[in-house]
Amino acid sequence: MKLYFSQNSPYARRPRLVLHEAGLQDEVEEEDLTPRAENDAVLFANGPGGKVPALITNTGAFIVESLLICRYLDDLSGNKLTPPQPEERDKAIQLEGTASVLMDTLYFRTHEGRRDESHQVSTVKEKDAKIAMATYDALNEAAADFGDTINLGIITTISALGYADWRHPSDNWRDGRPLLADWYERISNRPAMKLTAPIY
Ligand SMILES: N[C@@H](CCC(=O)N[C@@H](CS)C(=O)NCC(=O)O)C(=O)O
């Protein structure tokens, strides 16, 4: 099995964290396609999207979309990253959804900001910034229960916040959100978090 990624993709960081936190290193090989422009051919040869992350399974399927790949890898691990209790499981899925919203809104804002000034829509950027702020607040509230648990929701939260630090440092997401900031500081020391962090 092979997982294609690029080091600074927040979407690719999710399944990479699943792979390393669930101990699937012997079953899934990783291939870094950075820099993307030079290495995209393998993605287009296998599917129409040309995006990372992408997984080639042992049966030859080419799976895209971070959420699907995370689920696939978690299944493979015997659901190591899904809490067995219904209440905890549902809370982890809720967290995964909230952090996915954050990741999408940050990513869209990055790309809106790259368009020519004259084509940028300030209301779109403002709406995305507002959603990001509300999402940081929701994550801060949820962080009261994070502890040192690792699950798919936690993994998505780390991937989104790591991207926020890189692309949207002026959001200052730590300001006024001490629970989230302290937890992130602690969890960032894990080897898998360090290995998959964006480099800039
Ligand atoms: N919804 C997709 C988004 C994946 C995505 O947008 N990946 C970016 C890298 S962060 C990419 O490969 N972009 C290249 C492109 O759009 O050409 C997922 O969750 O996997």
Image (cartoon, grey):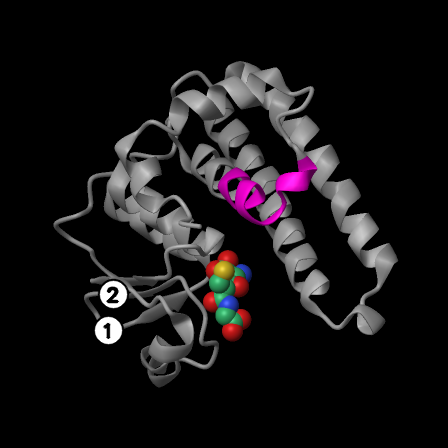
- At numbered mark 2, what does the secondary structure look like: helix, strand or loop? loop
- Classified by dominant secondary structure, the portion drawn in magenta counts as helix
Above-or-below relation of 118 to 67: below
- Ligand 1 within 8 Å of disc 2? The answer is no
- In terms of depth relative to the viewer, which is nearer, 5 or 119? 119
Look at the image and give the residue range highlighted in magenta: 161-171
In the rendered image, which quarter is residue 113 located in? bottom right
Q: Residue at x 40, y 49 (%)?
A: 199
In x, y percent, where is residue 66? 44, 56
- Cβ–Cβ under 8 Å for marks 2 and 1: yes
- In terms of depth relative to the viewer, which is nearer, 119 or 48? 119
Q: Amino acid at mark 2?
A: Thr
Query: Which residue, given by chain and number where applicable, does mark 1 sit on?
Result: 60
Tell which residue pokes out farthest to the front in this image: 200
Could you say which disc has been placed on residue 178 in the image?
none
Q: Residue at x 31, y 29 (%)?
A: 190
Q: Is residue 64 left or right of residue 57?
A: right
Q: Amino acid at mark 1?
A: Gly
Query: Which residue, given by chain and number where applicable, does mark 2 sit on?
Result: 57
